[in-house]
Amino acid sequence: MRTLLGLLLCASTLPALTPDEIIIVVNRAVPSSVELGDYYAKARNIPKDNIVALVLTRDEEITRAEYDQWFVKPLREALAERKNKVKCLLFMSGVPLRVGSAMPSDGDKAEMERLKPVVEAAKTKAASNDAATAARGKMELAKVEAEMLILAKRESKASVDSEMMLLWWDNYHLARWIMNPLHWQAGTRYRQGKPPVMMTARLDGPSPEIVRRLIDDAIAVEKTGLSGKVYVDARGLAFDKNNPRENGGYGYGGYDESMRETAAMFKTAKWNVTLDDKEPLFTPKSCPDTALYCGWYSHGHYVDCCTFQRGAVAWHLASSEAVTLRKPESTLWCPKLLQAGVAVTLGPVAEPYTVGFPKPAEFFGMLATGKYTLAEVNAKTTTFASWMMVCIGDPLYTPFKNKKVFADADLFASPKQGKTLFR
């Protein structure tokens, strides 16, 4: 019997991402950005007029005002006549990585002042000894606190890549996140009536040479298929579906379980798999011939545990591992993995919470069908838009195109006993 994920993917009639559906965004203020954009376009036969050159800050962070004026506005103008033809934005090294926090307007501040007594009244109800009154108070408090969060624009910093998924959206709230309409669990009712949503990816790293290697490796490895071993570094955390802190599988236990499910999937497919299900991380140089790696939680401290095969896909679940991609001296996982030779990694530009990451079994499982490009896998398995995540790699990279491991019918919602955030 096919699983839910397999059924939903099989039901999809959307054609695979093609080169002419990708827009390459480069920064004219950074010469190497323009050069790398040309290099990628030639390597992947992307039309020359699919390169959009903007004049942006050279810094990795752009202010919200600059983002709106010098990024969103000209990009919309450049793509206005191709709005329904373009599916993916590729940001080339030199393009800002993060967009800064938004600030509440005078109107927002006035509304927050008006709501303060409403918050206090709800708190009083929630503390009532009468169960029914307390229940109503808690519901009212949750609602008004959500309104306050949106008005205050709390946690509105985001990755440029995630924010740009909503390029065609107007006046959406900037507090925290927007549920991603491209996610495989987002149903027709949720997607209905919404503007187009963009897939995104980034070719970036500590040097232009590394960026060129990402392009060359992806194209070369596709021809024969990715080979090597799978290393999964879980932590031995139990998943209790009845624990409210697990939020249906989006807490620590749920992600740890998804890592174990990743290992089990590839073992069943006869791959050489090493699963470490204990708290300590893999030790340095203990993982030779790595094709796929997933682990956690060494925050801001890269451990050189893997020797990577060409075309390897590897990411580490921890906060802020993509705060910078361009500083060679950084000890963050994303730039260090790129220096170590991977072709694909992903990470957040600030605190994403566990739920900001894709479920490992869904991400690696879908990638290993050989049916979906990297950009499609990322878009289908990342829960939020307008949030923190960045996917670094060739958006067209399909490492298992000629070496399929799974069919859609083999895939499942992970963890298997979890629940979805989508309604």
Image (cartoon, helix red, strand yellow):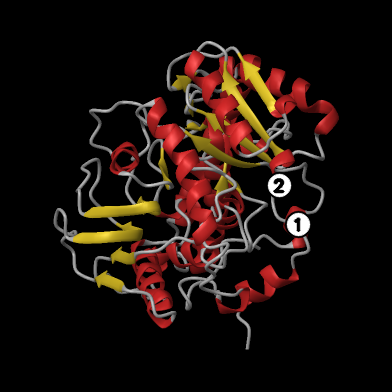
Q: Amino acid at mark 2?
A: Thr
253 lies left or right of 235: right
Q: Residues within 10 Å of mark 2 (few under 14, many from 20)?
A: some
Give the image location of residue 331, x and y in percent: 23, 36
Camera-nearest residue between 206 and 420: 206
Give the image location of residue 134, x and y in percent: 49, 61
Give the image location of residue 380, x and y in percent: 60, 56
Compared with residue 211, is residue 121 higher up or lower down, i.e. above or below?
Answer: below
Q: Secondary structure at mark 1?
A: loop
Give the image location of residue 28, x and y in percent: 57, 13
Circle 2 sits on which residue?
18
Q: Is residue 292 visible?
A: yes
Q: In the rendered structure, are the residues bearing label 1 and label 2 in contact, judged by CB atoms less than 8 Å apart?
A: yes
335 lies left or right of 94: left
Mark number displayed over residue 75:
none
| The furthest residue to the bottom | 1
Circle 1 sits on which residue?
15
